[in-house]
Amino acid sequence: MIQAGIRHLPVVDGTRLVGMIDDRRLAGEYVAGPLTAKPRTVRDLVEHPPLRARRDTSLRDAAARMAADRADAVCVTTPTDDLIGIATTSDLVHALAGRPLAHGDANDAPVTPLLFRLTPVLPTAD
């Protein structure tokens, strides 16, 4: 996810949406480091049911649903729950600004995995 510059992964069974995992959920599994993490599966971490919207849902309605659920992404599905895509807060902000996010734009900026960045702290000379 870090390498791809994404924060949300839909979980599907074939093309049918069954859940969503985000980077915060995954990071929570590694609070004490990856060596101490319990072996878990995607099924253990997936958010059921994920927030959904249809392709013809207005941006206003999608934003209202996201605000009500305190979610930062909504899965876009067909009436039979086949996944079409994901709309994120970034997508909504870009659309509001009149600058829809192109698919390649998310990967253009360098990605720094802040959760795992180490910053040395040197002792003071007191």
Image: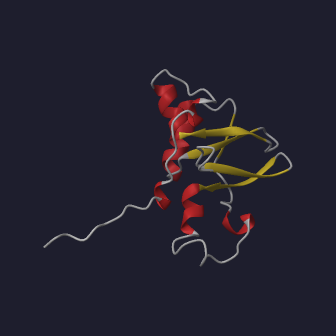
Identify the residue at horizontal 13%, vertical 73% (top origin). 126
Residue 118 x %, y %:
43, 62
Identify the residue at horizontal 55%, vertical 25% (top origin). 100
Residue 78 x %, y %:
78, 38
Name the residue nearer the viewer: 36 or 28. Answer: 36
Residue 14 x %, y %:
86, 49
96 to 66, vertically: above or below: above
Name the residue nearer the viewer: 71 or 12. Answer: 12
60 to 42, vertically: above or below: above
Farthest residue in the right direction? 14
Farthest residue in the left direction? 126
Identify the residue at horizontal 55%, vertical 44% (top origin). 65
Identify the residue at horizontal 68%, vertical 57% (top origin). 49
Q: Is residue 41 left or right of residue 1?
A: right
Count of numbered circles on the image: 0
Residue 76 x %, y %:
69, 39
Name the residue nearer the viewer: 71 or 117. Answer: 117
Specify how the rendered protein is coloured: secondary structure
Farthest residue in the front direction? 125
Q: Quadrant of residue 54?
A: top right
